[in-house]
Amino acid sequence: MEKQVAIIGAGVSGLLACRYTVSKGFNPIVFEARNSIGGAWINTVETTKLQTPKPAYQFSDFPWPDSVTELFPNQYQVLDYLQLYAHHFDLLKHIKFSTKVLGIKYQGASDEEMQSWSLWGGNGEPFSSRGKWIVEAQDTKNQLSTEVYQVDFVILCIGRFSDVPNIPEFPPDKGPEAFHGDVIHSMDYANMDYESATDSVRGKRVTVVGSQKSAMDIAMECSIANGVEHPCRVLYRTEHWNIPDYNPWGVPLPYLYLNRFSELMVHKPGEGFLLSLLATILAPLRLAFSKFVESDIEKKLRLAKFGMVPKHSFLQELNSCLIATVPQGFYDKVEEGSIKLKKAPSFSFCKEGIKVQGEDTTLETDLVILATGFEGEKKLKDIFESKMFQDCILGSPDSAVPLCRECIHPRIPQLAVIGFSESVANLYTSEMRCRWIAELLDSTFKLPSIKEMEKDAEKWDQYRKQYSGRYYRRSCIGALHIWYNDQLCKDMGWNPKRKKGFFAELFEPYGPADYVSP
């Protein structure tokens, strides 16, 4: 009997999961709440562009069309590329659009029995004759209409940067309710059409809270709409090594951080004695690389002049997947006065605007835009109906989400998570994971015991805490993507070394094209 696979989400990861499960003979159902593919790319700020250079953000066997000449394509170009991919591999027929998954429920073994298993799913297999997932889905056009599906395997591709905005908590009577102006999240701003978004900020004193890509993009749009007459204030907590380009001092960044030699300088999960020794010996070089990049960013963006030099290293930024490309001309706007930067470890609202902790002056404001990210963990947790799965999916509060190979939770059977763990090029990483999942479903390999998977996840957690600092819960593999891909390749029976020749293998950057075939 044919096994039924359900894929939740038709963003980049969902399309990849669909393509590779189809390649193994499955006929997946893809549930997508919106009426089109694209995930987080469907609604963006007008000035949003790809953060990763185009060659690193492409499907391994489906390059960008020649008509896209920009190194950093915009929203429409990315969506068009995804549409071309979906049509080329005939994926749209598998997608149920305008169908929101309300929850998933496992039907099979009891909680007590599952807790006693030594192998994933009880048998170490992706499918079970006893276990099924019940998927409850709602028609978003007719919310009274719900349907229930029974499937053998679920792939969650719900993303972590959409749908559930992260709203900071405030003391009583010091939150948005105390403010007489408007407070919105960056998601609300991105959901407007471009003209409405511009009209919403024009002629207003706007404060943007945040320092990452969305905050910078929105601040740029506000400054263009209002100039120095109504400067856009950016409230930030931490300075970051956001980059002006990918060529520090003329050296392409991938040659510094995206090849095997760069990974020799980092302690790796599961490394042996020799690799550990080498990483220790090369530590000064690792520091030198980081300082080399930092000096270029400082010079090009004049960070010292604006008090924006971070206290942490560029390597930590890379290991946290927090690197963003600074919009062109951003610091020129700061210099002219149409954008004002204000450090605020914490703040609260009052009737006229915002009060920064430790300061008496009120920052008078008409509109506050919270570019404070999303609650991806809550989104992941809430899709499960089982209290046991809700408790175990996120792991302990002082560890990252404990996923084996960043895909499989050892204690949750017949389910995979794609796109929650980050990298420097998420499409590239999601494709490798989807190929790995497809091979797992096709019984190419078996997973080790639950204890072994949990030990492996713990090693990766220790690595993140060492190199990512307080951002370890972002589950970033940014500085070890080749080491990570090597593990996937070995599981699938592929040769992990993809280059021709010793020096090419050591010094050439790795990218999607290196994994076009097994």
Image (cartoon, rainbow, N blue to C red):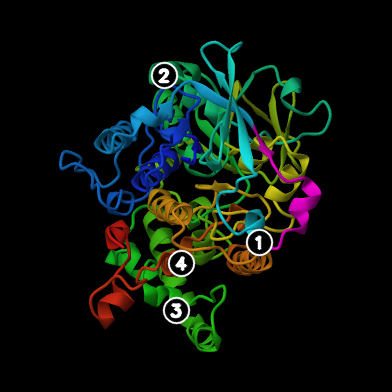
Q: Say whether residue 109 is magenta.
A: yes
Residue stretch in magenta: 104-118
Residue type, mark 4 in image: Asp
Reply above or below: 255 against 157: below
| Foreground disc of the pair 4, 1 | 1
In the image, farthest residue toward the front: 1
Percent x, y for residue 205? 55, 24
- Quarter holding residue 496: bottom left
Which numbered disc flags the more N-terminal residue, 1 or 2?
A: 1
* Residue to which mark 3 is pinned: 264
311 displayed left or right of 198: right
Q: Which residue: 40% across, 54% down?
A: 435
* Residue to which mark 2 is pinned: 193
Q: Secondary structure at mark 1?
A: loop
Are the residues tagged 3 and 4 within 8 Å (C-beta)? no
Most foreground residue, 101 or 321: 101
* Residue to which mark 1 is pinned: 119
Are the residues tagged 1 and 2 within 8 Å (C-beta)? no
